[in-house]
Image (cartoon, coloured by chain):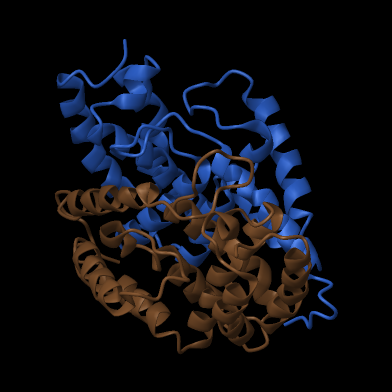
Chain colours: A blue, B brown
Amino acid sequence: MIKATENSAMQPIANFILELDKLKGVTRKTRPLGLDRYENSAEHSWQLCLLAISLARYAETAIDLNRLIRMLLVHDIGEIDTGDTMVFIEEGLAARKAAELAAVTRIFGMLPDGGGAELLALWNEFESGETPEARFAHAVDRSMPVLLNLASEGQSWRENGISYERVVRRIEPEIKAGCPALWEYLKGRLEEARGRGYFGA
Amino acid sequence: MIKATENSAMQPIANFILELDKLKGVTRKTRPLGLDRYENSAEHSWQLCLLAISLARYAETAIDLNRLIRMLLVHDIGEIDTGDTMVFIEEGLAARKAAELAAVTRIFGMLPDGGGAELLALWNEFESGETPEARFAHAVDRSMPVLLNLASEGQSWRENGISYERVVRRIEPEIKAGCPALWEYLKGRLEEARGRGYFGA
């Protein structure tokens, strides 16, 4: 524990948390169910944590749920400078990732006493996607918009012209790798959704 | 670890996470900085987790940050049935709390294999406010709207006619008990804000 003297640490922490406030203004392509607006990356991050908690007991390899949750809390913070881009847009990916890294380096660097180092490490771990926790995090990140789309007759797929094939090609490897039981479930639901015309052309 | 057979656990988990989606539609009285809408309890919960992570190193007693984070993730879920009520409204508090307990009992009960029991325990721990983690959680929950108001010239205080005295009386005990260093900092900022006319009458 660090003794905070003369509020020295509190002002930079206040600046940091107000900088993070901007993630509430980063909009995604999915809408919260029944709401007439797009969801933002802050509320999305919250929901992913709850999905991870719900699913962790069914993971096939041991995962550290605490690290997984922290990873999900920070994984989208780079979007404060870059905005959100649909997972299906692969163009410009390298440049976008470099810009996100610059953003999180700047933002986590606002924390005093080196407090941002752990958060930066978590962000990098998510991006690398190599640990069981990072793979699980990617699986829930890919699955949540699918679950929302299945409940909204494919709102973001139809609005953005995303086909069944494109969805499956993009999400299957990551969901399967991170949480196979979830993929088994989603696979059948996606086929049903195809029959119902929930996808774009 | 539990082996999920024939997707038996996945459908109720999907139902649960879509039920939680409703928290994105529960609005509070504060606005995200620079945005023309009120913040919702889902994005607020996300932000509290980051504030807790940022502050935990300065806690005066040992706290379990992992449990604290999980507590913050679930602490507002009862509002799905009741809506958010400003902390200054004490009228009807007991009835509201009973309705929130009924809500979380219903919602966490949607999880299969008894998975909701831990979440219900965390929610109850927050409500009781007796452990160091629960006290810390209350401190960050009280502080976040203060930090937003200090940065928005007292937006929610002015809109709702909340005076300086009423703010201090309501938040000081909880912030002081949970995170004294944070209160030391906020105390001075609140006095400044009073001089600048950030409060309601």
Q: Nearer the viewer, residue A3 or A58?
A: A3
Residue at 73% x, 41% y is: A103
Counting labels gives 0
Q: Does residue A46 appear left or right of residue B64 in this picture? A: left
Q: Does residue A34 appear left or right of residue B141 in this picture? A: left
Residue A77 in view in this figure: no
Q: Is residue A123 above or below residue A193?
A: below
Q: Position of residue B139 (x, y in %)?
A: 57, 76
Q: Position of residue A96 (x, y in %)?
A: 66, 29
Q: Nearer the viewer, residue B57 or B89?
A: B89
Residue at 50% x, 41% y is: B37
Q: Is residue B25 above or below residue A159?
A: below
Which residue lies most toward the top here?
A201
Q: Is residue A68 above or below residue A194?
A: below
Q: Nearer the viewer, residue A57 or B86?
A: B86
Which residue lies most toward the front here?
B201
